[in-house]
Image (cartoon, rainbow, N blue to C red):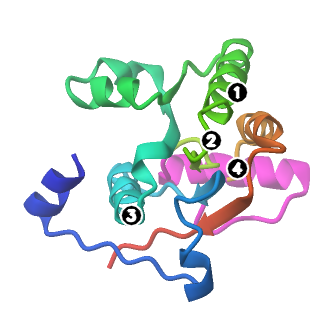
Amino acid sequence: VTFLAQWWSGIDVTLYMKNEDVQYLGKEHSLALLNHKYDIDWVTTWIMAERFSLLGGAKVFSKKILLFVPLIGWAWYFTETIFLRRKWEHDKKSIRQDIQKSCDYPKGYHVTLLLFPEGTRYTEKKHKASLAVCRAKGYPELKHVLLPRPKGFLVSVQGLKGHCECCHTAAVLYI
């Protein structure tokens, strides 16, 4: 998928980070937090993950309905994507079980959980709803991203506790 995306679109992905931190990519369990603005964010994230030897151990959350998309759904199933139904009682169990499975991989195999904390891509309608929640709860109003969805994030962090050596944060920017 990453090859086709790069070949067809001519996309170029650049990662800016401290040189001393690059040596750890793919060599330790990690959590990567990224913003989710467009439909193609997952492809650019996969391209970045592939370039830095993270793709083989990358885990993501996705809507369960995407499991049934030919080729992509099957690929995501075999890479142990964590599929969510947007029903919290079910999703909480799935996240816990799948994170635990990922943490139990053999020594030397490192997992990176690629997480879009907003839980959905950015639209003006969703941004207005996000701002309304921020105002109602007294949170700062976010201009360019949606209010993060904390429940799945918290369950993920709890499951990674003791296994995850670092957390990467990134802003995806399209030029």
Quadrant of res 8? bottom left
Q: Are marks 2 and 4 in contact (CB under 8 Å)?
A: no
Pointer 3: what residue?
48
Three-letter residue code for mark 2: Lys
Judged by depth in the image, the label closer to the viewer, 2 or 1, is 2
Q: Are marks 1 and 4 in contact (CB under 8 Å)?
A: no
Residue 124 drawn in magenta: yes
Pointer 1: what residue?
100
Instruction: From the viewer's side, name the closer residue of 154 and 47.
Output: 47
Q: CA distance from mark 3 to mark 2?
A: 24 Å
Q: Secondary structure at mark 3?
A: helix
Q: Which mark is residue 13?
A: none
Image location of residue 42, percent across then percent down: 39, 49
Q: CA distance from mark 3 to mark 4?
A: 22 Å
Tell me: residue 93, above or below residue 35: above
Pointer 2: what residue?
107
Three-letter residue code for mark 1: Gln
Q: Which residue is depicted at the point 37% across and 30% down?
A: 76
Image location of residue 99, percent across then percent down: 66, 31
Question: Sequence order check: which comes first, mark 3 or mark 2?
Answer: 3
Question: Sequence order check: which comes first, mark 3 or mark 4?
Answer: 3
Instruction: From the viewer's side, name the closer residue of 23 and 74.
Output: 23
Three-letter residue code for mark 3: Met
Q: Label 1: how many residues lie within 10 Å, few (<14), some (14-19) or many (20+)? A: some
Q: Which residues are magenta?
A: 121-146
Three-letter residue code for mark 4: Pro
Position of 15 with respect to 157 (left or right) is left
Instruction: From the viewer's side, name the closer residue of 159 and 149.
Output: 159
Pointer 4: what residue?
148
